[in-house]
Every structure is written in structure tokens, then in C-alpha cells.
Image (cartoon, rainbow, N blue to C red):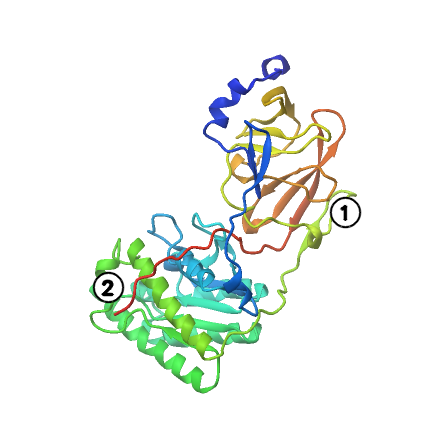
Amino acid sequence: MASHIAFLSLAFLSSFVSSIPLSTPGSIIDTRENVQVDSRFNYPLDKRQNKAFPLRVLPLGASITYGVASSDGNGYRKALRDQLRFEGWEVNMVGNEQGGTMRDNDVSGYPGFRVDEIIKKAEMVVGRQPNLIAINAGTNDATQNKTGFEVETTGKRMDQMLDLLYEKIPGVTILLSTVLQAKSDDTTRRAKVINPQYRDIVERRRKQNQRIVLAEMFESDKPWLSKNDLSDGVHPTDDGYKKMAAIWWNAFQEADKAGMLQPPNKATTVNRCENNKATKLDANKITIPGNFYEPVQSVQSTEVSKNEGREAVWAKDGEAFYIYKLVNNNYADGARVDIKTNCWAKDVRWLDVNGDGLDDFVCLSSGRTLNIQLNKGGEYPPKFEDVGKCTVPHGGDDGEIVDPKLPKKP
């Protein structure tokens, strides 16, 4: 095996290198010149500097919140996030799940869930202490109309969820969406029973000086976001999701003008490392790059050996990990790395978690927990030690600021 992978040339790896960027989160490597280049986008800071605090945004709801039926899985979230950032806000999306191709893809959207079920999920995410929550929930109440959860009482369940959120997240601003029109006449009829309850909730709570704004998605019998904007009878098309983003944006502007927004509270999520070895790690000292969670390829460029420059590490699903030195622009001295894990290549990341100058092996699991094996250095290839799991803070990315060109509601 060793002879098979030893002295691997650049030509042998070209099938990977020509189509796969050898990159670590936050940087790329130009193998032709062996020059490391910063991959952060450049963007204007003037607008962002005008905002006194960042937004920690929780998209909360069911499948529409998750982005089902959108071509990129982002639904309305990326367009809304882009609009907020284009207007100068620093944004970090939060949630218990991840979905879509966007970098900052945290979300609490649960396909098929009614309002009563979403309440239980809301209890699990309040520790993130968002200062802005966008709620779209009730479509499944309308489609299912289940005994004990009839549409006539959906407003009561929404009130319960709002009570929970305001109690657990002091000062939070909530944008509450009405239920979208559906192609099914029965679902649309039930949505018309739910929506007046939501409108009454917002009106009553505004009179109580609570920070809440209605995001009206079904304003008439011929709504702007109509049946023609649905892909499958329930979920919007890409253009429909952009309309949703525009409605959210209008609601956000109303909240901003009313002075409802305030800085986020300190998150109460516990950042910790559950070490099973003598080596101790402090989760609060682990710095996660903004694009750490974006998709990666099976071949990544890392620095796992001292005085060896950068290496290419190939993660082969279900088999092993292979490392190759980059010598004079050729990949050589191939070796198998003894990393014992069932981690899929898509979940592998390389990050120096303890500040010793060597990249460590990280496998992502649900909830973005990091399963860490520390790089112990030494002989080539280096040895790795399993030190357990860490839950670490995650901030929003600082990718390119773009104008999403949201459609204008007539």
C-alpha cells in the first residue's frame, strides 16, 4: 500500500486538483505559484459601521421556513439576509437545524409541524437569544385540521409560543407572518380562519407595547403572494420566496422605524468541551471561521506537519485518509493517516483548535458539534488523538454583500 501511494505526482492528483479547490476554511491555495491567498470577499464597511448592534435572526416555523421546494434550499432566508446586510446590518442566522446552500444556514424550520409542535422546538433554541424572530407557522394546522388542534384555536397556540419567547428572550422583536394562500380550497379556507386570529394577536400585543409586527402574506382574496407563486400547492417557487423576503423586509422596516430593535442579549448556550482524555480544551478559545460550515470537497489543503508546508489530505468515504506533501508544486510522499472515525468526507474540516500551529481533524455532527482529534505532530504522517466533542459559538459569515433586488409589493 505504501509503495502504491508513495511519491504521488501532481499529474496523478490532477484529476482532483483540476476540479476540486484545495482549500481550508478562510483561504485557498494556488498550487501553480504555491501562494496562499485570502479568500474573504471585500465589501464596503460604511453602512455596517452606521449600525449600533448586530442582528441575531431566528427563522422559526415549518417547511416553508426551512425552504422546501426552493431550488437552493434557502427559501426566503438568503434573500432576506442579503437585504439586511445590503442595508448595513451585521447578521447571524440562528436555529437548531441547518438547511440550504447559504453559508449562514442556521434555521428552526420543521416540515410537517403544527404550531403546538413548533412550540417544543422553540423551547430548545431560546438559549441562542435572538433579537429578531421571523415566525411563519400554521400552514400545517390548516392542511391537517387535526382533532384537538382545530384551526379555530390555532391563535391560542400561537399566543402560547409568543408568551414563551417573550419570557425567555427579553427585548426580542418578533415578525409574525400570516398563513399563505394555498392551491387547495380547503387549506385556503382554513387559512382564512387562522389569519384573523394572528392579526388580532399582533394588534393586542402592540397595544401592550410588545415588540411585534405583522408580516401580511395573505392580505386579500387575491394576494400578491398568490397561488401562482406556489410550486406544489403549498410551498413557494423561488420567485414566491423572494416575495416572502420582500414582505419580511417591509415588516422589519416597520419594526426598525418604530424603535423596536435592540442589541441581542448574551447567548445562554453553554460552550463546552466534553473531553474524554487528559487533554483539556476551552470551547470559548476555539475560533471558527465564518465559512467553516460551507460545503467542502474530499481533497482539502491543510497544514498537518511542522516544517513541511501545506499538504493535501484526501478523505475517502468509508475507507481512510491519505496525506500528500506539496514539494516543488508536486504532491509526493503519500501516506495513510491513522484517523479512526466513520466521518463522511463532506463533514471533515481541518482547524487548529489548540493554537499549536498544526491543523487538527474535526468531524461535524448534528447541531454543529465538533468531534475533535488533536494533531500530535511528530513523525510523518502525524498521529491523532481523539479528545471528544466540543460545542462552540458560531457567528455569521462575512461573505460578499449583494443587493438581492427584492420585488416591490404594489
| Residue at image point 70% right, 30% down | 305
Q: Which mark is residue 226?
A: 2
Q: CA distance from mark 1 to mark 2?
A: 55 Å
Residue 267 x %, y %: 62, 64
- The C terminus lies in quadrant: bottom left
Examine the image and state in which quarter residue 1 appears. Answer: top right
The three-letter amino acid code for the residue at tag 1 is: Lys
| Residue at image point 44% right, 67% down | 134
> Counting residues from the N terminus, which is met first, the one under dot 1 or under dot 2?
2
Residue 75 vs 314, above or below: the answer is below
Mark 2: secondary structure? loop
- Horizontal arrangement in the rendering, residue 254 relative to residue 93 (left or right): left
Residue 330 x %, y %: 59, 21
**Residue placed most toward the observer, 273 or 161:** 273
**Residue placed most toward the observer, 181 or 160:** 181
Residue 42 vs 337, above or below: the answer is below
Q: Residue reaching furthest bottom?
A: 207
The three-letter amino acid code for the residue at tag 2 is: Ser
Mark 2 residue crowding within 10 angstroms, few (<14) / some (14–19) / many (20+)? some
Question: Which residue, given by chain and number where applicable, does mark 1 sit on?
Answer: 280
- Horizontal arrangement in the rendering, residue 91 relative to residue 307 (left or right): left
**Residue placed most toward the observer, 164 or 89:** 89
- Horizontal arrangement in the rendering, residue 275 relative to residue 18 (left or right): right
